[in-house]
Image: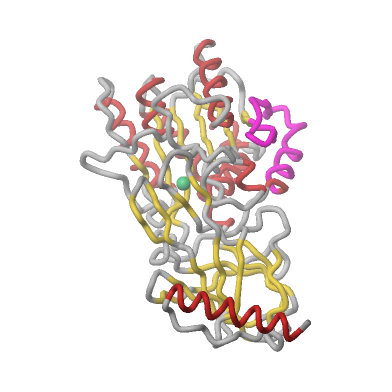
Amino acid sequence: MIRVRFVTLGLATAAMTAFTAAPPKPPVSATNHPLEFIDTSFENASPIWYEFAPDGTVLIHLLYDHERSSPNRAAGHIHFQLQAKPQSKLTLEFLNLDNVWNGVSSSIARELKAVVISENGREWKPVPLESLPENRVRLQIEMPGPRLYVARVEPYRLSDLDRLLASLRSNPLVQITSIGKTVQGRELEIIRVGNPQPPFRVFLRARAHAWEPGGNWVVEGLVHRLLQDDADAKKFLTRFCVYILPMANKDGVALGRTRFNFQGKDLNRDWNKPADPQLAPENYALEQWLEGMAGKGQSPHLALELHNDGNGQLHISRPPVPELPRYLDRMATLEELLRKHTWFTEGSTKGSFRNSGTLGEGWLERYHIDAAVHEFNCNWIAGLKDYPSAKHWQTYGEKLATVFYEYFGLVRP
Ligand SMILES: [Zn+2]
């Protein structure tokens, strides 16, 4: 039996070698390797496959998710648990970072500068990554115990959102409304914080792209600030209330995908036309909600679409709409207030920048709402000279309350 297997394998190897004309790779034995297993069975874990290089490096192959009717693909969500001998030293290499974005090849290898690690999945600390040729990055790590989580940035899971929602439900200043369901049938909630009839309304959406948890931490910080029982919170809520769709791509977050929804749609695209209820039910539900608000004369005065990338800018798009000068003027006010009250230093897109199909541009074009995409740099916070963390993003959200208060003091509807 063993002999037969050996012969079969030998023939297969010979055939493959002849076919590809590549030198055969030396056999790899993982028997004595300190890594026992990589667990990806839990909530928000990234789908991967892995193998051992001859020198013992663990090669982690991220899996791409794909956009429908498009060459676009994305990988870059990292969240798994290493199970290995305590105190062993592991070398990991991340592969498949060659994304296609807006039809153009665009490796994220150069912008991947750090990951975070945690023994319990709650307290995380950053570890720098090393850039290698051919769009690979390397992580060298010593196991503090038998289990260690590795993630791209501090994860924010569905269970984290459920905990937030549970803590808010009985608050008289909060209303949680279900607006529809995701492709896989998960409930989509909008959280309103504040009185229903204030002079101004702000809308925020987070997590259209599943790997990007920064926006979730930001909106948590904002919600908690607005619900602090103090004079400033009361003052804020006499001027504005916030409506938050905290997790647009819940299916992707639950199953550890990188970017698209489960019908291969990018939820931050196609806002220049009505949403498809079958392919993008997450956007269709939001669009129905928005049109309902408009019908009641309660459209948001400002909308922010929160994301993570390697730059952290405010994306000011310039579609040819008559109200463009008014919009640009207000976005300049917003940027100034962000610089004044938060750690924001990254600035905004200039010149003829267009961000076609994004919620920012689409809501301005179709609904005349002052809307923008706000990216948060996932690698470094220049204004703090520190790695990003849940805590820093929450602080940002807390300060947004002041930003919105002053913004609506300066602009007129
Ligand atoms: Zn994004």
Query: In what quadrant of the picture does the C terminus appear?
Result: top left
| In-front residue for pair 6/368 | 6
**Is 402 situated above or below 192?**
below
Residue in view at x 49 percent, y 41 percent: 400
- Identify the residue at the far left of this view: 351
Residue in view at x 59 percent, y 63 percent: 151
What is the x, y in percent for residue 313? Answer: 37, 49
**Is 301 situated above or below 219?**
above
Residue in view at x 24 percent, y 43 percent: 350
- Residue 45 in magenta? no
**Is 66 situated above or below 153?**
above
Relative side of 103 to 54, left or right: left
What is the x, y in percent for residue 126? Answer: 55, 69
| In-front residue for pair 52/177 | 52
Decide if residue 365 is in sight here. yes
Magenta region: which residues? 160-189
Image quarter of residue 23: bottom left
Decide if residue 239 is in sight here. no
What is the x, y in percent for residue 220? Answer: 61, 44
Question: Which color scheme did the rendering employ for the protein?
Answer: secondary structure
What is the x, y in percent for residue 59? Answer: 55, 74
Image quarter of residue 146: bottom right
Count of labels shown?
A: 0
Query: In what quadrant of the picture does the N terminus appear?
Result: bottom right
**Is 177 situated above or below 186?**
above
| In-front residue for pair 263/400 | 263
| In-front residue for pair 322/399 | 322
